[in-house]
Image (cartoon, rainbow, N blue to C red):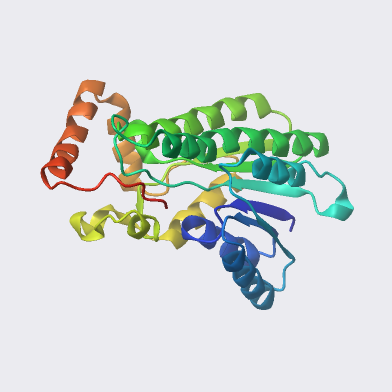
Amino acid sequence: MGTALITGASAGLGLELAWQLATARHDLVLVARDAERLDRLAGQLRAAAGVHVEVLPADLSVPDDVARVAARLAVAEAGSRPVGLLVNNAGYGLHQRVVGGDLAAEQAALDVMVRAVLVLSKAAVEQMVGRGRGAVLNVSSVAALTATGTYSAHKAWVKTFTEGLAVELEGTGVTATALCPGFVRTEFHERAGLRTDTFPEVAWLEPGRVVARALADVRRGAVISTPSLRYTLASALLRVAPRAAVRAFERGPRRAMRSRGRSADTLAA
């Protein structure tokens, strides 16, 4: 069924993507920082689904590591299993303000969620266009439409970049899709130290359904994938709401955090 490369494959949506793609008989290239965790996952996938799984440990905030992943994506020879689906999923949140925050942490997050997406997407689509088929799935967020600090800025870039890439790829046989979920029940929020019980149950999506919808949207060539009616409606409201209203909505939680004296430590997803 082809080969998919997934960044951030060891946890969250990346992990669910790996399982669903393996179940659909796709070979995989798994990318994440934790080599031990990747090796364990690769063994489970091989045993359960009988697919070929490569492990490519990489820290996408490190340019040399990004270059290694890009080199794997650039492979187009059939004997080397060319990648037919790239999933740019790696990402994390920074629980800090820009003012007074750690600049190095901000730069690393920018490298992972913006620079790496650009470099890897370019490497992938250039070999895909040459073969006349392929797809890129970039994980953005409904947060792209909000004002939650640099995370929103990164995800807004991913969404806009993917839309522009989709236009450029029209007629090539290659597609680009931006996945824009809302709150998903993964370890992202636990790693970020966020209490999930502060959000209503209706706000949460199950990772299995999010991934199934995203892959279905990739197959049909959709440019934007918003995997639930509630977040489709929320996105529509955010697009038409005055930006002043969006900013005002964001100020409430920020004031609450400051009043509780919450730490500004970096929290990775």
Looking at the image, residue 37 sits to the left or right of residue 240; the answer is right
Q: What residue do we see at 30% from left, 35% from top?
A: 148
Q: What residue do we see at 27% from left, 44% from top?
A: 264
Q: Quadrant of the N terminus?
A: bottom right
- Tell me where residue 141 sits by quadrant: top left
Q: What residue do we see at 13% from left, 42% from top?
A: 256
* Residue farthest left in this picture: 259
Residue 175: image x %, image y %?
A: 64, 37
- Number of callouts in the render? 0
Question: Is residue 191 positioned above or below 124 on the image?
Answer: below
**Residue 123 visible somewhere in the drawing:** yes
**Residue 242 visible somewhere in the drawing:** no
Looking at the image, residue 97 sits to the left or right of residue 16; the answer is left
- Tell me where residue 154 sits by quadrant: top left
Residue 27: image x %, image y %?
A: 72, 61
Residue 220: image x %, image y %?
A: 59, 44
Question: Is residue 164 positioned above or below 93 on the image?
Answer: above
Residue 163: image x %, image y %?
A: 54, 29
Looking at the image, residue 264 sits to the left or right of residue 90; the answer is left
